Amino acid sequence: MNSYIPDNQDAISIVVTATDVNGYSETGSKIYGLDSDAPVISFTTPSPNQQFVYGDSVTVNASLSDIVQARDNMKRNSKDNRNLGSGISEATLAIYDSNNIVIAETTVSNSNEIETIVSGLLVGNYNVIVTATDNVGNQSQATIEFFVTSEVQPFANILPFNDVWFYNPEWIGNDEHPFMFNAFGGGNATISTIDVLFTSLPSGTYLGNEIINESGAPLYSVVLNNSVPLPEIDTSIKLTITVTNSLSNTLSFEQVFVLDDADPVISIVSPEDGTEYEISEDIIVSVDFTDIGSGLDVATAEVTDPNSAIITYTAINGNILETLENVVLGNYSITFTGVDILGNRADSTVAFVVINTNDAPTVANPIADFSFDED
């Protein structure tokens, strides 16, 4: 039997009724949670692109989770907003050398953590791949790279904004939105200096730099000041971090952030502003939200009825398609709101009215027109 499970469901119930030859019956039921989300893998150590000195032991550790927050559509329909997930079944951690040969591998079952320690690594780059599978077969994979060097080299790891490599130019000069990065001297060496350079692209305009003379943070932050105007033709900012350690070894690290100050686009399909609906009609709320920059973070439709009661719908994959229920006579308004990952926001409001159905009597057999002469 083929069946379809609506998007707004997070569990299914199976009810079985058995009847014997004497007519006695017994019913049993079981609720099964739905899980289509892959496990989440988060590396604890090493840091991305971390460098180790030849002879060091390297610990590779990752946390595993299959308890994910209820989807947006669940939040709207679930009273307890419960978490979903079937749990980790198995995970494998493999380390590959620069020739793509596996030099270490470990597997765990029913665990929220996986770890291995390797030593005697040759100079070169190494890739770690962790694969995790939950109890219903959903699978995910995460990778990280580290290096083994012949000498103690510094390194830096530049961090994204809200997990995306985008930057809002309205943040320039704002202390609440600094660029963040980790920096290390490498091995037992400390940091002597960190040179931070900002350049806008594609023009290559110098926007400013800052020298940091401190060690051991290891998390650093720096604000892009507005001393140099950002050229209108430029579409991104390049951040260059140059770290010098106490052994006078120097390395530079770069990351490009795409500029995004554009609001999401709200495309309302229905209802149209100013529409009159009879109370017997279906009122469909249909809207599409798009964002070509950092991506949508939140997209909602807030319906206010004539009694000032509010119903909020949350977009699924950038779309809302709902039928209003229990409508009453009077004026309605719907405020559509889209917010992207960097906080750019768009709002749009429509209003409509629900009127009574025209239930006046009708003439079943109308009398034909006729004329007469006056006396």
Image (cartoon, grey):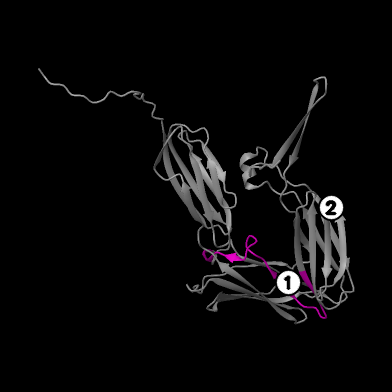
Q: Residue furthest left?
A: 375
Is the N terminus in the top left, top right, bottom left or bottom right quadrant? top right
Q: Pick the residue in front: 213 or 247.
A: 247
Q: x and y percent of residue 57 in the render?
A: 87, 70
Q: Residue furthest top?
A: 375
Identify residue type, mark 2: Ser
Q: x and y percent of residue 109 in the render?
A: 86, 53
Image vertical order of residue 48 relative to residue 298, above or below: below
Which residue is found at the position 50% from the left and 58% from the top? 263
Q: Does residue 6 appear left or right of residue 113 in this picture?
A: left
Which residue is found at the position 71% from the left and 39% from the top? 12
Q: Quadrant of residue 3?
A: top right
Q: Which residue is mark 2?
A: 111
Q: Which residue is mark 1?
A: 215
Q: Does residue 81 appear left or right of residue 30 in this picture?
A: left
Q: Pick the residue in front: 17 or 87.
A: 17
Magenta stretch?
145-170
Which residue is found at the position 45% from the left and 47% from the top? 349
Disc on the earlier residue, 2 or 1: 2
Q: Residue 1 shows which numbered tag?
A: none
Q: Quadrant of residue 132?
A: bottom right
Q: Residue furthest right?
A: 120
Q: How many circles with numbers are drawn on the protein?
A: 2
Identify residue type, mark 1: Ser
Q: Measure the C-alpha gap from mark 2 to mark 1.
A: 37 Å
- Classify mark 2: helix, strand or loop: loop
Residue 154 among those drawn in magenta: yes
